[in-house]
Image (cartoon, rainbow, N blue to C red):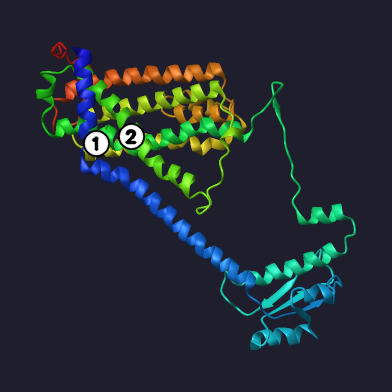
């Protein structure tokens, strides 16, 4: 019977949430904005490429003086540049509009800058002058190198391949950090997007004055547990909807919107860090869900509850004030406190798990803390909801809630 009531509550709460227009408005707004952003990036990149092509093909008159003696007339001719009689005359010609650009190469290029003077064509188009000036100098320097190996090194960046070891085993580097850090991203997204829904799950009954009627036929533990489970289901649905524009953009418009190619084969999925990361995410989500449900049970209106909800959301961002310490010195006292304090533990432990500084024992301790606190907050939420059913217009007193004996809940 209890299982039947729980499934009824879960399905009712889930369907009630997703049948509201405001749920779909709020849920679809994010992917819609992301879709518009992808479309704008696509159009912008197309325009930028067309502009870049036009600039590359554009020709402009160039004069130069070279005190260093590196640039020969033959090399300058490759850029349609002509030697100027003097710098003063060339600058005057640029000012008068008869010359587009003048480059003045100093005698000592190691300490003195190359002076570039040009006709103003806008902050972005003016960049072509410095690019051509640098290209002329690079071409002159490369022409003086006879060794083909040295010449190749001046034209390409050397590739450096770093291999590190941890406990005698090759470390995964960034490829091992990315997969477990995805749990932190999902955790943040779910809390930020569902915090209001968590709070409203118990406030709606109080504001509609139907709490007493519900509690005459339903065990409060079954009711609160069903609400929490339905929030998990709503969070899963929203995660799928929110990620859909990214997946569609990556699969079909990756080159157009310049999304970096993701080679899944190079990522390292360490079973231990992935399991710990998943449990930390679920435990942290459970703790915040039950805490916000309890907060909704104690407050008479959503307006008053909103102030306290902001404080709880702020706790999620506190560990980022010491993120450099979390990465560089995870044994620091403040990091240790944040690791085991329940409301900062999910973010801190997920960061440390991603960067490989959270041991298996530490991870297990934090997971146990999160699930124990979640179970405790669920009991508190049930108690507060049961007591708050008769407090429609005032905030529930914690002292009276835990000292007052309630009638036995209906059998389920």
Label 1: state its secondary structure.
helix
Q: What is the quadrant of residue 87 in the picture?
A: bottom right
36 lies above or below 20? below
Asked if residue 29 lies left or right of residue 183, the reply is left
Residue, x 40% and y 49% (percent of image)? Answer: 34
Q: Are marks 1 and 2 in contact (CB under 8 Å)?
A: yes
Q: What is the quadrant of residue 175 in the picture?
A: top right
Label 2: state its secondary structure.
helix
Label 1: which residue? Answer: 18
Asked if residue 322 lies left or right of residue 89, the reply is left
Q: Nearer the viewer, residue 212 or 24?
A: 24
Residue, x 74% and y 78% (percent of image)? Answer: 80
Q: Nearer the viewer, residue 226 or 360?
A: 226
The answer to whether residue 1 shows anywhere in this view is: yes
Q: CA distance from mark 1 to mark 2?
A: 9 Å
Label 2: which residue? Answer: 237
Find residue 235 and report its horizontal and vertical position in percent: 34, 33
Find residue 230 and report its horizontal and vertical position in percent: 27, 27
- Which label belongs to residue 43? none
Q: Nearer the viewer, residue 396 or 119?
A: 119
198 lies above or below 32? above
Q: Nearer the viewer, residue 271 or 189?
A: 271
Identify the residue at the far right of this view. Answer: 146
The answer to whether residue 299 shows anywhere in this view is: no
Find residue 295 and report its horizontal and vertical position in percent: 27, 29
Density class for disc 1 (Cα within 10 Å; few <14, some 14-19, many ≥20) is some
Counting residues from the N terminus, which is met first, the one under dot 1 or under dot 2? 1
């Amino acid at each position: 019977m209890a299982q039947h009531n729980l499934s009824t509550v879960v399905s009712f709460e889930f369907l009630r949430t997703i049948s509201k227009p405001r749920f779909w408005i709020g849920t679809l707004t994010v992917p819609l904005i992301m879709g518009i952003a992808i479309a704008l990036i696509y159009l912008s990149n197309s325009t930028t490429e067309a502009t870049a092509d036009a600039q590359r093909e554009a020709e402009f008159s160039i004069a130069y003086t070279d005190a260093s003696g590196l640039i020969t007339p033959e090399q300058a001719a490759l850029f349609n540049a002509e030697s100027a009689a003097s710098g003063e005359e060339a600058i005057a010609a640029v000012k008068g509009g008869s010359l587009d650009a003048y480059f003045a190469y100093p005698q000592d290029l190691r300490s003195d800058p190359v002076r570039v003077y040009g006709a103003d064509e806008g902050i972005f188009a003016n960049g072509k002058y410095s690019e051509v000036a640098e290209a002329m100098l690079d071409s002159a320097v490369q022409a003086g190198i006879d060794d083909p190996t040295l010449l190749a090194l001046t034209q390409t960046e050397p590739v450096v391949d770093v291999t590190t070891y941890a406990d005698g085993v090759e470390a995964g580097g960034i490829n091992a950090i990315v997969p477990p850090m995805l749990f932190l991203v999902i955790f943040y997204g779910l809390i930020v997007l569902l915090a209001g829904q968590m709070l409203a799950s118990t406030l709606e009954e109080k504001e509609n004055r139907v709490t007493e009627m519900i509690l005459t036929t339903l065990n409060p533990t079954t009711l609160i547990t069903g609400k929490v489970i339905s929030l998990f289901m709503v969070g899963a649905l929203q995660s799928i909807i929110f990620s859909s524009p990214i997946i569609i953009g990556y699969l079909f418009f990756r080159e157009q919107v310049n999304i970096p190619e993701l080679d899944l084969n190079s990522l390292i999925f360490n079973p231990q860090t992935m399991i710990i990361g998943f449990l930390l995410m679920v435990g942290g989500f459970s703790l915040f869900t039950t805490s916000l449900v309890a907060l909704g049970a104690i407050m008479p209106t959503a307006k008053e509850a909103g102030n306290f909800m902001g404080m709880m959301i702020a706790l999620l961002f506190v560990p980022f004030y010491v993120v450099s310490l979390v990465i560089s010195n995870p044994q620091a006292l403040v990091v240790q406190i944040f690791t085991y304090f329940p409301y900062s533990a999910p973010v801190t432990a997920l960061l440390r798990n991603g960067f490989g500084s959270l041991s298996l024992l530490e991870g297990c301790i934090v997971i146990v803390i999160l699930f124990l606190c979640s179970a405790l907050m669920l009991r508190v939420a049930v108690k507060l909801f049961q007591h708050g059913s008769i407090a429609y217009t005032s905030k529930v007193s914690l002292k009276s809630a835990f000292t007052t004996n309630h009638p036995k809940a209906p059998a389920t």
